[in-house]
Amino acid sequence: MAVRPNSPAAKDIAYVLHPYTNARRHEETGPMIIGRGEGVHVYDDQGKEYIEGLAGLWSVAVGFGEQRLVDAAAKQMQQLPYYHSFAHKSHEPSILLAEKLLEIAPRDFSKVFFTNSGSEANDTVIKLLWFYNNAKGRPEKKKFISRIKAYHGITLASASLTGLPANQKGFDLPLDRFVHTACPHHYRFAWEGESEEEFASRLAGQLEDLILREGPETIAAFIGEPVMGAGGVIVPPRTYWEKVQKVLRKYDILLVADEVINGFGRTGNLWACQTYDIKPDVLVTSKQLTSSYMPLAAIMITDEIYQGVADYTKELGTFGHGYTTSAHPVATAVGLENIKIIEERKLIEHAAAVAPRFQEGLRRFADHPLVGEVRGVGLIAAVELVSDKKSKAGFEPVGSVGLHLFERCQEHGLILRNLGDAIAFCPPLIISEQEIDQLLERFGQALDDTLQWVQSRAAA
Ligand code: PMP
C-alpha cells in the first residue's frame, strides 16, 4: 500500500530509525501505527482490531487500558513526578516495591536495585558481580557464561551475554570475558534417540568442560533465562536446571536467573525459578513487573553479595553506579499497583488455569504439514516451521516463511513475533478461554494461507 504524503506514516519513514527493523524495507512498507488498546486487543490507526498474542513485547500482563495503572501513575505524577535515589535519597513507592519484591521472591534475597530496562539490569548485574569479586579479593574471577540463543539485552555488555547473531554481527561483539555454552533445545540439538535427561546430562558435561577449559577461578557467573524467550521459546529438557546448578555449585560459580520474560506468572508460577526448582544468587525481573506501562527493571541479590558490595563501598567511598531515573517514582508506583492487581485478580492462578487450553490447542497444529515442533509452558509457546518434518530441515532463505506467517497472522487480526522460522506466542495473562480459542482460530487460518503460499512458491 502506498504511503500518503505528509501522513504520520510518511513522517515515521522520514524521521524515525526503528529498533529491530529492516530500515530499507521500512522505507517501502512504512509502520503499522497502533492507536489504542483494550484488554488483549490493540487497534491500528484504521481501527482494525488485533489480538496482541505477544502481549506487546512479552510484557503487558494485565492487558491494555487498565485504569488502575493510569490512576496510580497520575496520582504519583501529582505528588512527586520525579526524584532520584542517589546519595541516600529515597521515596515511598520504591521502598514499598522493594519490600514487596523481597516478600514475593522465590528465595531469601536481601536487597533490590532498580533500573529502567532489562538490558540495563543485566549490565548492572555484570558490574555488580565484578565489583563483588574485586571486593572479595579475586579480581581474576570475572567471566560470564551464557547460552547460544540466549537473550539478555542489547547494551554493550548485555548484548555480549546474548547469544544471537543479529545482536552481535555488525556491532563488533561480544566483548572479552563473555563465553557461550550450548543451547538446551532438545528438538534441534539432541542426538537421534537421545532422551531429554541424556541430552541434559550431555549439556551439563559440556558446561563443565567449558568451565575447566576457561579455569573456574576466572568465571564469575552463569546467566540463563529459565525458559529462553527471544531465542525461540526454548523450554529446558527435563533435569537440565538440576544438572546445571550442580556443576555451578561444584566450581563456586554464581547463578543469575534472567526472569525478564518468565517472571510474574508466565510459566504457570509466579517465578519460573519455582517451575524449574532453580535457586539463583541474583534474579532479574522487568516487563510484566509494571505490565510495561512504565519502564522498570529490578535486580534482587542475596545477602552474601550485598555484604561484599557494602563492605567495598566503605573502602571506595561509594557504589559508583546508578541511573538518573533508577527507581523512578512513577514507574515504581505503577509496579506496586500492577502487582496488587495481579494478586487481587489471581492472575497467576488464572494463567495457570487457562494454560492447558492454550498449550493443547497449539499442539493440535503439530500435524500441520508446515509444523516441526510446538513447544511451550504456561502462557508462552512457539511453533517452529520446517520444510521437511522428518529431516527437520528449515526453509531457504531462513526466516522467509516465518515472516510470511507473521504477516498472514496480522491480516487475520493476530499479532505474534516471528523468530526465524519459529513464531512466538505470549498473550497477556488476563486472556480468557474464549479469546484463546479466537487466537488459535486466527492462527490456523494464517497457517493454512502460508501452506498455500509455500506450495505455490514451490510450484513456480
Ligand atoms: N532479558 C530478557 C530475557 C529479555 O527478554 C529482554 C528483552 N526482551 C531483556 C533481557 C532486555 O530487556 P530490555 O529490552 O528492557 O532492555
Image (tube, rainbow, N blue to C red):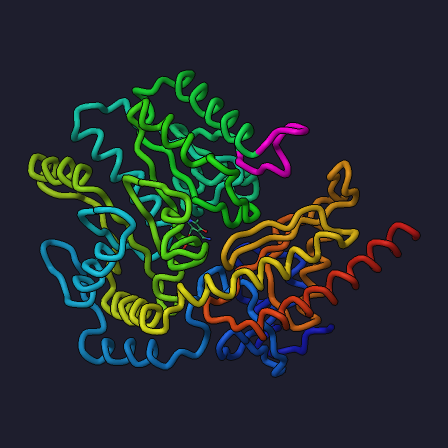
Relative horizontal placement of residue 449, taking residue 262 as reference (left or right): right
Q: Magenta segment: does it hold 428?
A: no
At x 62%, y 29%, the residue is: 194
- Please, what is the dominant secondary structure of the magenta stretch? loop
Q: Is residue 324 visible?
A: no
Residue 273 to residue 428: above or below: above
**Most foreground residue, 155 or 379:** 379
Q: Position of residue 372 (x, y in %)?
A: 71, 46
**Most foreground residue, 132 or 104:** 104
Relative horizontal placement of residue 378, taking residue 362 as reference (left or right): left
- Quadrant of the image for the N terminus? bottom right
Residue 54 to residue 209: above or below: below
Q: Position of residue 108 (x, y in %)?
A: 21, 46
At x 47%, y 22%, the residue is: 205
Q: Residue furthest right?
A: 459
**Most foreground residue, 188 or 344:** 344
Q: Quadrant of residue 280?
A: top left
Q: Which residues are magenta?
A: 183-195
At x 41%, y 31%, the residue is: 244
At x 22%, y 61%, the residue is: 100
Q: Is residue 181 visible?
A: yes
Q: Quadrant of residue 308?
A: top left
Q: Magenta segment: does it hold 191?
A: yes
Relative horizontal placement of residue 285, taking residue 411 as reference (left or right): left
